[in-house]
Image: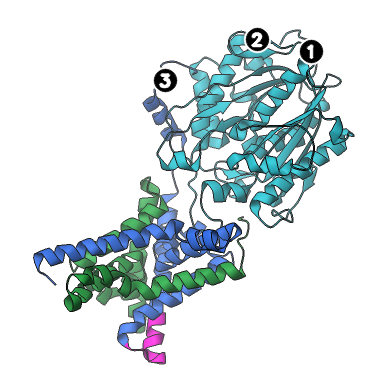
Amino acid sequence: MPSPTLKNKDYDYMVKKATPNTKSAKNISAAFLVGGAICALGELMGYLYREKVGLPEDIVPTAVSITLVGLSILLTALNVYDNLAKFAGAGTLVPITGFANAMSSAALEFKSEGLVLGVGAKMFIIAGPVIVYGVVASVLYGLVIFALGLY
Amino acid sequence: MLLVQLLKAFVVGGIICAIGQVLIDYTKLTPARILVSFVVLGVVLGGIGLYQPLIDFAGSGASVPLLGFGALLARGVREAMAEKGLLGALSGGLTATAAGITAAMVLSMLAALIFKPGDKS
Amino acid sequence: MAKKIGKYTLRMNNPPSVIAGAAIGSKKEGEGPLSAYFDIINPDSSFGEKTWEKAESRLQKDTINKMLEKAGIASVEVDAVFGGDLLNQCVGTTFGMREIGIPLFGLFSACATFAEAMALAALLVDADTLAQAAIIASSHFCSAERQFRFPLEYGGQRPPSSQWTATAAGAALIGTHVQPPYIKHVTIGIIEDLGVTDANNMGAAMAPSAAATLTHFFSDTGTNADNYDLILSGDLGAVGSELLYQLMERGGYDIRKKHADCGLMIFDRDRQDVHAGASGAGCAAAVFCAYILPSMREGKLKNLLFIPTGALLSPTTVQQGESIPCICHLIHLADSPEPAGV
C-alpha cells in the first residue's frame, strides 16, 4: 500500500472525484426521445389495428405488444437494437421492446451452449426476473385484495 | 385527433423512459433491477387504480413501458379473482400477459435458430 | 539465479532477453493508432471459428505460431510456455495450446497475466532451468463480454468509466541473454483491495495495486521515475491512470511525465467509443509485443518499467457484492544486461 493511512473511504472519495460523470442531460433526452418514439409507434399501430384492420378494442393493446416484441427481436437478430440502445439507454430498455431484446439477445448468444441449456435456459437470464417478480407481486396484490374483500 | 393521441403517447412514454434513465445514471441499479422495479411498481400502481387513468389518457405511452406490463398483471389478477375467487390470484397474472411473453419466447427461439450474434462496434 | 533485493524485488543475475515477439489484433485494434505495428490484423473477430471461445483459442494459437516463425525456431525448441487469458479455467490458453506440444504453465493474473508469465519465464531462464520459454496472453471482446457482462446483442449502456476489452494477443520468447531488451528485475505484486466494487470502473480498482508494486520497486532499488524512460501500465485507462498519479504523489513520487498506459494506446478514445480506454489480458501483451519491444530493439526506449495490473474478480464475486482484489507485477527491462546503475 502506497500510504498506510489511505483508508477505503478516502480512496472512495478519490475515485468519485476522478471518475467522469455520465453525460446525463444528453442521456436523459435521448431516452425521452427514443422511448417516446417507441410508444408513439405503438400508438400508431394501435390506431391502424383499430381503424384499418378492425380489430376489437380489447385485443388491440395485445396486438400492439406482440408487434413491438416481434420488431424488437428482428432488430436484435439483425444486430441493430444494441446499437440503438447505446444511444437511447432507458429509452430502449423500459418499453416492452427492451424485454424482448433481453430474451432474444440471450437466446442468440447462448445458442453455442446448445438448444436446451443454451437457448432454452439462458433466454431468461435477464428477462426471467422480470416475469418472476411481476407475477409474485401480482399474486401478493391478489392476496391483499382477497384479505380486504375488494375483488 | 390521431396526432394528439400520438403526441400524448410520445410525451408520457418518453417521460417514463427518462425516469428510467435517471435511475441508470444516478443510482447503482443494474438494468435488470430497473426492469424488475418498473414491473413491480406497475403492479402496485395498477393495483391501487392509479395506472388505468394514465393508460386511458396516453394509450401506448403508458401500456408499452414495462409499468404497463405490471399494471396488466394486476388487472389480470383482479379480473380472474372476480370470476374464480382466490384461485384467480394465481392464474390471472400470467393469463393476462401470456400473449406477450409467449410471443417473446417463440420469436426469440426462432431468432436463435436463424441468426447469430455479431461483434459489437 | 535471481536474488531478492529489498522486500519484494528479484534481481536477475544473468538478465534474460526478450528475443522475439508477435501480436495479433482484430477489427477495432486495426482501426486504432497502433494498427501498423501488429503482425496480423484479422478484421474477422471470429477468426473463422464457430464460437467466441474457439475464436480466442485460435487467436492464441496463431499468435504463438507467428512469434515462433519470427524467432525462426520450431516449437520443440521451446522448453515451456507460460500463458493465460480471462476465460473461466483459462480455456483460451489450454485450448489454444492443445496442439502446440510445449510444456504449459497455465496462469491467471487477469490483465497482468502477461507480466506474470514474463516474470516466471525470466526467473527460470536466469536460473538456467530453461534455455528459452514462450509467454502468451490474450483477451477477446466477445468471449469476455458474454462471460462477465451481457449477451452481445443486449441493449445496454456502458458508463464513461468502463473499458473496452481488446480482442488481441501477444506472445514473446524469453531466452538466455543475447540482445536487448534485457529483463533485469521483476517485482511480484501483492493483492491490493481498497474496496472498489464497481466492475465498470476497473481502472479505479487496479490503480492501488500499480501504486503498491511501483512503490515497492522504487524503495527496493532506491530509484524513482527519473531513472526510467517510461513507466508503462497495462490497462488502467483514463480513470485509473489519474488515480495512480495521485496515489504515487502521496508517496512522494511524481510519475506523470514518465507514464503511459497500454489501454490508452491501443485505441483512440476520441474516435472509437471505448470510454475510459481498453482492457483485457491481450491489451498489455499486444501493445508490448507490437510496439514496445520493437522500440526497445531500435533503442528508442532504453529503460522501461512494465507494470500491467489485473482485476481478480469473477462474475460470481461481482454478483455477491464483493470488492475487487487486484494485482500488479512489475518487469524492469533495459538495453544493457550490466547491473550498473539500475
The residue shown at (45%, 70%) is: B104
What colour has chain A?
A: blue
User: Which stretch appears magenta?
Assistant: A44-56
Q: Earlier in the sequence, mark 2 or mark 1?
A: 2
Q: CA distance from mark 2 to mark 1?
A: 14 Å
Question: Can you identify the residue that label 1 sits on?
Answer: C14
Residue A20 seen in render: no
Q: Which residue is mark 2?
A: C4
Alpha carbon separation for disc pair 3 and 1: 38 Å
- Distance CA(mark 2)–CA(mark 3): 28 Å
Q: Nearer the viewer, residue C183 or C293?
A: C183
Q: Chain of mark 3?
A: A
Specify whether C104 is left or right of A4. right
The magenta stretch spans residue A46: yes
Viewer-proximal residue among C177 and A25: C177
Residue C254 higher or lower than C134, as above or below = above
Residue in front for this viewpoint, A145 or A18: A145
Q: Are marks 2 and 1 on the same chain?
A: yes
Q: Amino acid at mark 1?
A: Asn
Locate residue B25, reporting x and y percent.
Answer: 40, 49
- Check disc 3 and report the residue beneath it: A6
Q: Is residue B38 left or right of residue C41?
A: left
Q: In which quarter of the view is residue A144 placed?
A: bottom left
The chain containing the residue under callout 2 comes to C
Say whether mark 3 and mark 2 are on the same chain. Answer: no
